[in-house]
Structure formats: structure tokens, C-alpha cells
Image (cartoon, rainbow, N blue to C red):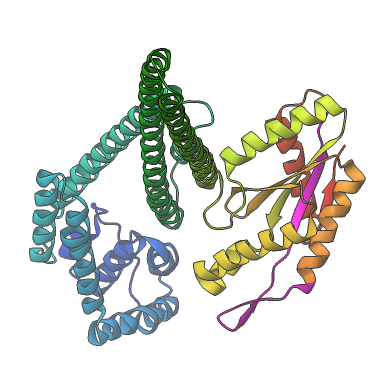
């Protein structure tokens, strides 16, 4: 058999046309090589190009190796995938996509019925689709649905922002109408702070809601007690006024009887008659004295009851103020919240200016708090936060301030402490935390924190001081965990 001659270049370069026009093995092989070279990925870039080169050079041994590699590496795997459920995986993927559209997305879109119906209809169309059917229409519908969902989400976010701004404006006006120092002012300020802080996690919102519900219940009881006490005071004052009127009537009657006795004495004709008139005068006088004594005793008792009622009112109002102070505190840890920090810092800064004393501030950030939440859950994370605040209270001084700045960050305000003293106080808290082992549900939770310390400069704003301490805290974090970095 004579060796095959050179393969002629056909007029067309389209693989399908080449395969159709091929009338001998060499032309068929060339058409197949051209088709493979046009495939994407490794099949085209590696095997297809190699096969086309081997065919062009009539290197049949290389052609055989490429075809064998194609058979062993790709066709066997493809056949195995068909036999082992590759199609089933595609079906599963399509079913998951259908459920995402028809169940999950449709449920989220219930407030917008037309989008919910389109999502369900698109899911049904996807379920009916079979290989070979046109995907272009489904793709267009999916893109349009995504666009409409994005538009609706943007409009919903705008409506929510508008409602929140209206609610905040209402609270601001209510705040201005309240008396300074009112317990309700603290509640309004706390809710406004929560609105301005931006989106909060569900746990924080639920804790705040429970705290406010308990606060409202306690305040309703206290207000009821104050109302009852004030009613009692009004009743006692009414009794006092009635007693005074009775004394006035008795005094008037006594004056009238004295006039009658005086006239009878002038007209008396005997010592006996004068003696009888004198006895009547003494009896009337003694009766008036007894009435006056009873009135005095009743008035003294009424005064004591009024004073006791006033004391009860003052105590109840103090309890109301204390209940209002709860809104200034973080419901989880009991530390001050941002509102409480703002008020307390203003007091301490003014005091530091008056007395020319230093005022230090420390930013504290728990180390590895995300890992604590991942390992021990939110319950373990909450336990760790409360534990840190408890240790800080024990380590710091009585007039020092602890506030939760957000998440796992805390602010310490240390009046009268210079930079060295403040740094020593924070390191003391670290040492105490190291020896206080914390366990949650039988498992130990390692708890440390890093801190940055700064001292307020004359006239420095609170935000600037916090910013300096925050930068120092991040320097401590970069240097390793469980460190304190001071900045001047």
C-alpha cells in the first residue's frame, strides 16, 4: 500500500462543513482536528491544537497518542458521569434553582404580588425546561426579575429610611416638650440613639425591647403609686380645711355665748346667780380649749401624714429617675450605652476643666471575640461580654466610667488619672481578667483584651480623644493580643 499523500486544504474551514464534505479518512481526521481546536478550555488549547498539528504534519503516531489521551482522559470520564448520575446532578441543580425562585424568593416577594407571581411562574418554566429547549427567553425573564427585585428593594429601603426619619423627628419634638431631667427624656433619648446607630442585630433589638417593656411596667406601677399618694395628700388637706372651718365656727359660737354671759352678769341680782354664770363661762372656756387641743392634735397628725406622703412621693420620683437611667445603660452588660457615655463624659470633662485635673480615656477591644461567638455561640459571647464588664468594675475605681461603645468595644473614662496612672489601671484589669477563669456550658472561654490609652488635652473634643485612644488600641492589637498602648 502506497503512503498517503499530503492532505489537501479544503475550501471551507468550518468543522461541520469539513465533516460533511470529508470523503476519505485523512480529510475526516483533519475535520475532526479542526473541530477539537475550536473547543474551549484544555480540549481545544491542548489536545485540539496538538491533533491539528500532527494531522498537518502527517505524524500519525502523534495523532494516535492524542486520540488515545482523549479517549482515556475525557471520554471515559464523560461516560462514567452519564452512568453515575451526572445528569442527576444537573437535575438537582435545576431543582434547587427552581426552589430558590418559586419558594424562597416568592415568599420574600409576598408584599409585591406581581413579582411573587413572576418568580413562581419562572420557577415553573424552569421545571418544564429540557435540554435542547431555548434558554434565551428564560434568561431574559430572569434578568428582568432581578432588575425589578433590585428596584423594589431600593424603594423599600427608601421608604424605611423615610419612616425612621419621621419617627426620629416625632421623638425629637417630644423630647423638646418634656421637662429637663424628666425620666421620659431618658427613654426618648435611648430610642433615638438606637435609631441613629443604624441597623442592629436581632439580639440587640430583642434585648432592648425586653428592657423597655420591663421599664414601662415598672414606671406604670410607680406612677400609680404617686397618683395614690397625691390623692391621699389632697384628702388630708381637705380634712385640714374642714377642721379649720369647724374651729372658726366654734370660736364664733364661743364669742356669742361670752356676750350672753356678759349681759347676764350685768343683770344678776344675787351672788348665787353670778356663781352660776361664772361656772357656765368656765365650762364654755374649757370646752373651747378641748376643741382647740383636739384640733391641734389632728393638725399635728395631718402634718406628719403630709410629710410622710411627701417623702413617699420623693422616693417614688427618685425611683422613676433611676428607672429612666436604665435607658442610659446597655441592657446586656449593665455598662453605660452611648447616650450614658455622652452625658457622663460631659460631666467629667467639665469637672476636669474646673479643677484643672487630668482626664484619661481608654478604648478596650476584646481579643478574638468572633472566634468566641463561633465556638461558643452568642450565649457564650454574651457571657464573655458581661464577664469583662464585671472584671473592669472590680479593677477600676469607684468614680471611673465604663461604657459599651458597640459590639465588643468598651470605653473607660478615668477622671483624675494621668497617662501612667490610667495605663496602670488598665493593666491591672488585664491581670485580674487573666486569673478569673470563665466557663460557659462546661467549656472554658479564654478572654483577653487589647487597649489604647490617651489623656484629654485642654479643649479637646470627646470624638477626637476617642479617635486617639482608638488608634493606640489598634497599635496594641498589631503588637499582639492582651496589650496596652499609651499615646501622648
Over which residues does the magenta segment extend?
Answer: 435-456
The N terminus, quarter of image: bottom left
The relative height of residue 126 versus residue 227 in the rendered view (above or below) is: below
Quarter of the rendering containing residue 89: bottom left
Report the number of numbered marks.
0
Residue at image position (58%, 45%) is 337
Can see residue 189?
Answer: no
In the image, what residue occupies the spot 40% across and 77% down?
Answer: 60
Residue 192 is drawn in which quadrant?
A: top left
Q: Is residue 345 left or right of residue 353?
A: left
Whether residue 246 is visible, yes or no, is yes
**Magenta span has 444?**
yes
Residue at 59% from the left image edge and 55% from the top image edge: 334
| Viewer-nearest residue: 89 or 305 | 305
Picture coordinates of residue 411, whole percent (x, y): 69, 46
Q: Residue furthest right?
A: 420
Give residue 423's position: percent from left, percent from top: 86, 50
Left or right of 314 on screen, residue 461: right
x, y percent for residue 63: 40, 76
Q: Nearer the viewer, residue 240 or 429?
A: 240
Residue 444 image offset from top left, x and y in percent: 65, 79
**Image height check: is 322 above or below 84?**
above
Is residue 238 in the magenta section?
no
Amino acid at each position: 500500500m502506497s503512503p498517503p499523500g499530503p492532505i489537501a486544504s479544503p475550501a471551507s474551514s468550518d468543522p461541520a462543513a469539513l465533516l460533511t464534505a470529508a470523503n476519505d479518512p485523512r480529510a475526516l481526521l483533519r475535520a475532526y482536528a479542526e473541530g477539537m481546536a475550536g473547543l474551549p478550555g484544555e480540549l481545544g488549547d491542548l489536545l485540539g491544537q496538538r491533533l491539528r498539528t500532527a494531522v498537518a504534519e502527517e505524524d500519525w503516531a502523534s495523532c494516535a497518542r492524542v486520540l488515545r489521551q482523549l479517549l482515556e482522559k475525557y471520554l471515559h470520564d464523560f461516560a462514567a458521569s452519564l452512568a453515575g448520575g451526572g445528569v442527576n446532578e444537573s437535575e438537582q441543580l435545576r431543582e434547587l434553582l427552581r426552589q430558590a425562585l418559586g419558594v424562597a424568593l416568592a415568599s420574600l416577594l409576598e408584599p409585591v404580588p406581581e413579582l411573587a407571581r413572576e418568580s413562581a411562574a419562572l420557577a415553573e418554566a424552569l421545571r418544564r425546561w429540557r435540554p435542547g429547549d431555548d434558554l434565551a427567553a428564560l434568561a431574559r425573564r430572569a434578568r428582568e426579575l432581578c432588575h425589578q427585585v433590585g428596584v423594589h428593594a431600593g424603594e423599600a429601603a427608601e421608604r424605611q429610611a423615610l419612616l425612621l426619619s419621621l419617627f426620629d423627628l416625632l421623638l425629637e419634638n417630644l423630647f423638646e416638650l418634656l421637662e429637663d431631667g424628666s425620666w421620659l427624656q431618658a427613654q426618648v433619648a435611648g430610642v433615638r440613639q438606637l435609631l441613629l446607630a443604624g441597623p442592629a442585630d436581632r439580639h440587640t433589638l430583642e434585648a432592648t425591647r425586653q428592657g423597655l417593656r420591663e421599664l414601662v411596667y415598672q414606671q406604670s406601677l410607680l406612677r400609680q403609686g404617686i397618683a395614690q399618694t397625691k390623692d391621699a395628700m389632697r384628702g388630708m388637706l381637705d380634712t385640714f380645711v374642714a377642721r379649720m372651718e369647724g374651729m372658726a365656727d366654734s370660736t364664733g359660737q364661743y364669742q356669742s355665748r361670752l356676750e350672753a354671759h356678759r349681759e347676764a352678769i350685768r343683770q344678776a341680782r344675787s351672788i348665787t346667780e353670778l356663781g352660776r354664770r361664772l361656772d357656765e363661762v368656765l365650762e364654755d372656756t374649757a370646752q373651747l380649749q378641748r376643741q382647740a387641743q383636739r384640733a391641734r392634735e389632728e393638725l399635728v397628725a395631718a402634718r406628719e401624714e403630709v410629710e410622710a406622703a411627701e417623702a413617699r412621693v420623693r422616693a417614688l420620683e427618685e425611683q422613676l429617675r433611676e428607672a429612666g437611667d436604665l435607658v442610659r445603660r446597655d441592657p446586656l452588660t449593665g455598662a453605660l450605652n452611648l447616650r450614658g457615655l455622652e452625658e457622663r463624659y460631659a460631666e467629667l470633662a467639665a469637672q476636669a476643666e474646673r479643677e484643672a485635673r487630668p482626664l484619661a480615656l481608654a478604648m478596650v477591644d476584646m481579643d478574638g471575640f468572633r472566634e468566641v461567638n463561633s465556638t461558643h455561640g452568642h450565649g457564650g459571647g454574651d457571657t464573655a461580654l458581661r464577664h469583662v464588664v464585671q472584671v473592669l468594675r472590680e479593677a477600676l475605681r469607684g468614680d471611673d466610667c465604663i461604657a459599651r461603645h458597640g459590639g465588643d468595644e468598651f470605653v473607660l473614662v478615668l477622671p483624675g488619672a494621668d497617662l501612667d496612672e490610667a495605663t496602670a489601671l488598665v493593666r491591672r484589669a488585664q491581670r485580674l481578667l487573666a486569673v478569673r477563669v470563665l466557663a460557659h456550658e462546661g467549656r472554658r472561654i479564654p478572654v483577653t483584651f487589647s487597649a489604647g490609652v490617651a489623656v484629654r488635652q485642654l479643649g479637646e473634643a470627646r470624638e477626637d480623644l476617642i479617635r486617639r485612644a482608638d488608634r493606640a488600641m489598634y497599635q496594641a492589637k498589631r503588637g499582639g493580643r492582651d496589650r496596652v498602648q499609651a499615646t501622648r
